[in-house]
Image (spheres, rainbow, N blue to C red):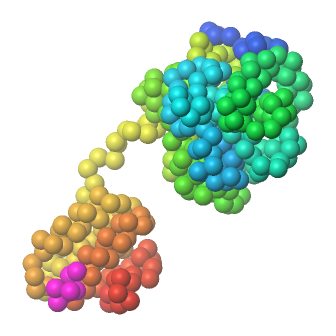
Amino acid sequence: MKSPVPDYLDEVLDSLRDDTSGANADYIPELAEADPERFGMALTTTLGRTYAAGDADTEFSIQSISKPFAYAAAIIDRGLDRVLDAVGVEPSGEAFNELSLEGGTHRPKNPMINAGAITAHSLLVGAEAGQDDRVDRAVTFFSRLAGRDLRVDERVCASELGSAHRNLAIAYMLRTYGILDGDVPSVVEGYTRQCSILVSVRDLSVMAATLATGGIQPVTGERVMDPAIARHVMSVMATAGMYDAAGDWLTRVGIPAKSGVAGGIVGVLPDRVGIGTFSPRLDSFGNSQRGRLAFERLSKDMGMHLFSSDQGRLDAVDVSESRGTVTFALQGNIQVTAASELLDLMAESDGAADVVLDVTRVHSFSDVARRMSLEGLRRLRLDGRKVAVRDPSGVLPNPDLGDGSYPDAV
Ligand code: GLN
């Protein structure tokens, strides 16, 4: 049999192909000339499987979609504190090329608008780095995220540099406030090269899936960044990724995302998928028109809104008692909700019986849920109860009760 997922993606593209509203970006001459009919989409799961439809291997310049990934690299290279000193994390609600600086600190409001992204680019590698070092860093890092060697499109880069007056103005302004160090034209040129790296929607979906896993490239298995950095970057994408349409996007689509003027959009749903779309015509906010509609469909059809609560009520804890033993059976992925429930049911359980915590049907514990569950066992034992764990597949390895002692195994 053939998986229906690619067929579904084909159908989504077909249903939107007739929408020819919007227009290619024209302030970068090369982009104005791109074929506006191109339309592709790819989705990569955190298990590393990619599904693609339409022009999935067509390359286009990454443009602003480079911003979250370069920001991640800057945090890796310089540390979060240094990066936060230079660039804030507040949504600006303004267009991508707006020069919005925070009152007082003069920091750009966030790394998704050009002012913040140029600053983040300037922080790559280290204080002594030159333009080539920073561009190499971006190309190499993006290549690791995508799992293949990416390169800069020199024509697009030259085309944008010919009219980069606004970005130069932004960067000179940042330089006067001491937010940006170094040679302004060289920083802007490096940033423009970063924006000119060529990707396909397939690449974007894998890059985003690497954020979705918390930093592990799902195809190569390489850890590319710490989970805390992936989480930080996804948060900024959620609040500021879609510029002045960020609120509309988050409520309607609910997938942290970033768009680029070449017509790409990347989206990431933590623990689930990375998504890339490409269609060059842009809406009035500078986001790909058909790409936006494709994300809306996907979010609706596949229940992909970040805030959708489609898990239903979870009956995670089952309590049963027989012959002087009370068994607490857990199932699924145990998070703080189920662990809290377990602790209350343990507290309510009758005082004499032996206790078994049965985790046979558990897939995983979050760190805190694990500690909470073990603390429950420790307290029951302090009350004089006999405590044991049934864990045939080892989802609770090393169940130290916090005092160096262990429950019995049954
Ligand atoms: N290189 C473009 C710029 O700096 C990127 C903008 C975008 O994709 N929104 O203007």
**Residue 168 image point, x, y percent:** 77, 23
Q: Is residue 296 visible?
A: no
Image quadrant assignment for residue 318:
bottom left
Q: Nearer the viewer, residue 103 or 74?
A: 103
Task: Classify the position of the C terminus by image quarter.
Answer: bottom left
Residue at coordinates 69% horizontally, 48% vertically from top-left?
A: 73
Span shown in magenta: 379-385
Residue at coordinates 22% horizontally, 89% vertically from top-left?
A: 386
**Residue 75 image point, x, y percent:** 65, 50
Q: Is residue 322 visible?
A: yes
Membership of 380 in magenta stretch: yes
- 285, above or below 233, in the image: above
Residue at coordinates 29% horizontally, 85% vertically from top-left?
A: 388
The reply, left or right, for residue 82 in relation to residue 186 is: left
**Residue 104 image point, x, y percent:** 53, 31
Image quadrant assignment for residue 111:
top right
